[in-house]
């Protein structure tokens, strides 16, 4: 039963070679974003994640802002290797900014004081689950995607450019576009037997 899902999660990869095209319509991109944000689980079902979908010129603008912010806070030598990477991201079709709404988290901290500090961790988990689901769904639709973290350096500029609540905390950016060029590099794996420990008193389960 799980084979299809397991196949899908094993074929999703980081793809940096992308261009400003999309194999699917903007309407489909938004439909996927809506389904993912609706159905991904969150702590206490608090639904703290927010997406800002930037396509084409708006996507380009975001990466221009990232370049300006990096350039303004780094020496020329430090910035040089970053500029190439940021230009690569900018070459894509779109970026979804993933935020956490801190007003929601604060509300749940008041309602569930025993979980006050857990809720901050849970908020990160909520966001990561959304990112993974979005990434996998886009991959299945033929988009090449990569996950970036140019926050917090860009935060103020982003809030002001797209008129966002200052209580939305930027956590990640999922960049996407039509894949071009080389397939993703070969991935190495730490043996799973060193990463999973099983205790089952009545049976021996081999881990491969
Ligand atoms: C929580 C998390 C943070 C990541 N941050 C970045 C990042 O800032 N920049 C980047 O290029 N890749 C980032 N990645 C991508 C990982 O490097 C990549 O998923 C990993 O090397 C495995 O490769 P794969 O995605 O092809 O399976 C991140 C992935 C995760 C799960």
Image: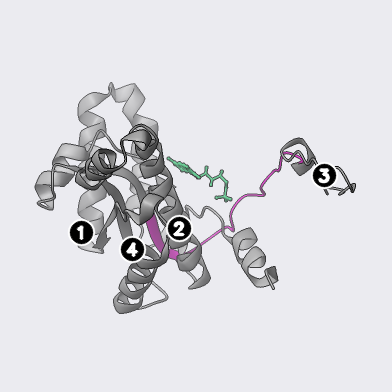
Instruction: Give the left or right position of residue 166, taking residue 145 as reference.
Output: left
* Numbered tag placed on residue 200 in the rendering: 3
For label 3, count other residues whose C-alpha is less than 10 Å away and answer few (under 14), some (14-19) or many (20+): few
For label 2, count other residues whose C-alpha is less than 10 Å away and answer few (under 14), some (14-19) or many (20+): many
Can you identify the residue that label 2 sits on? 145
Considering only order in the chain, which callout, 3 or 1, is on the residue closer to the N terminus?
A: 1
Considering only order in the chain, which callout, 2 or 3, is on the residue closer to the N terminus?
A: 2
Considering only order in the chain, which callout, 4 or 2, is on the residue closer to the N terminus?
A: 4
Question: Which residue is found at the position 28% from the left and 39% from the top?
Answer: 109
Instruction: Tell me: residue 79, above or below residue 182.
Output: above
Residue 55 position in % (x across, y down):
26, 64
Question: Which residue is found at the position 34% from the left and 43% from the top?
Answer: 86
Residue 132 position in % (x across, y down):
47, 55
Look at the image and give the residue range highlighted in magenta.
Answer: 175-191
Instruction: Tell me: residue 11, above or below residue 114.
Output: below
Residue 90 can be seen, yes or no: yes
Can you identify the residue that label 4 sits on? 93
Residue 50 position in % (x across, y down):
27, 55
Residue 20 can be seen, yes or no: no
Camera-side residue: 120 or 27?
Answer: 120
For label 1, count other residues whose C-alpha is less than 10 Å away and answer few (under 14), some (14-19) or many (20+): some
Badge nearest the viewer, 3 or 2: 3
Instruction: Give the left or right position of residue 101, taking residue 205 as reference.
Output: left
Note whether ligand 1 is within 8 Å of mark 1. Answer: no
Q: Tell me the distance, in whole angstroms, between the alpha carbons under discs 3 and 2.
A: 39 Å
Disc 1 element: helix
Question: Which residue is found at the position 25% from the left and 64% from the top?
Answer: 56
Q: Tell me the distance, in whole angstroms, between the alpha carbons under discs 1 and 4.
A: 10 Å
Can you identify the residue that label 1 sits on? 58
Contact flag, marks 1 and 4 (Cβ < 8 Å): no
Camera-side residue: 87 or 56?
Answer: 56
Instruction: Tell me: residue 77, above or below residue 186.
Output: above
């Amino acid at each position: 039963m799980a084979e299809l899902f397991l196949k899908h999660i094993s074929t999703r990869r980081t793809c940096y070679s992308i261009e400003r095209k999309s194999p699917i319509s903007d309407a489909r991109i938004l439909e996927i974003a809506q389904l993912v944000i609706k159905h991904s689980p969150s702590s206490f079902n608090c639904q703290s994640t927010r997406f800002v979908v930037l396509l084409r010129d708006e996507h380009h603008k975001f990466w221009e802002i990232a370049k300006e912010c990096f350039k303004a806070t780094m020496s020329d030598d430090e910035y040089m290797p970053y500029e190439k990477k940021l230009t690569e991201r900018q070459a894509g079709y779109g970026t979804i900014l993933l935020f956490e709404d801190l007003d929601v988290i604060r509300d749940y901290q008041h309602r569930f004081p025993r979980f006050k500090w857990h809720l901050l961790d849970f908020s990160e988990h909520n966001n990561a689950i959304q990112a993974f689901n979005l990434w996998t769904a886009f991959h299945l639709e033929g988009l090449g995607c990569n996950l970036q973290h140019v926050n917090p350096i860009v935060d103020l500029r982003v809030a002001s450019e797209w008129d966002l609540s200052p209580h939305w905390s930027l956590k990640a950016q999922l960049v996407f576009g039509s894949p071009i060029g080389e397939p993703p590099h070969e991935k190495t794996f730490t043996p799973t037997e060193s990463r999973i420990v099983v205790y089952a008193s009545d049976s021996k389960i081999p881990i491969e």
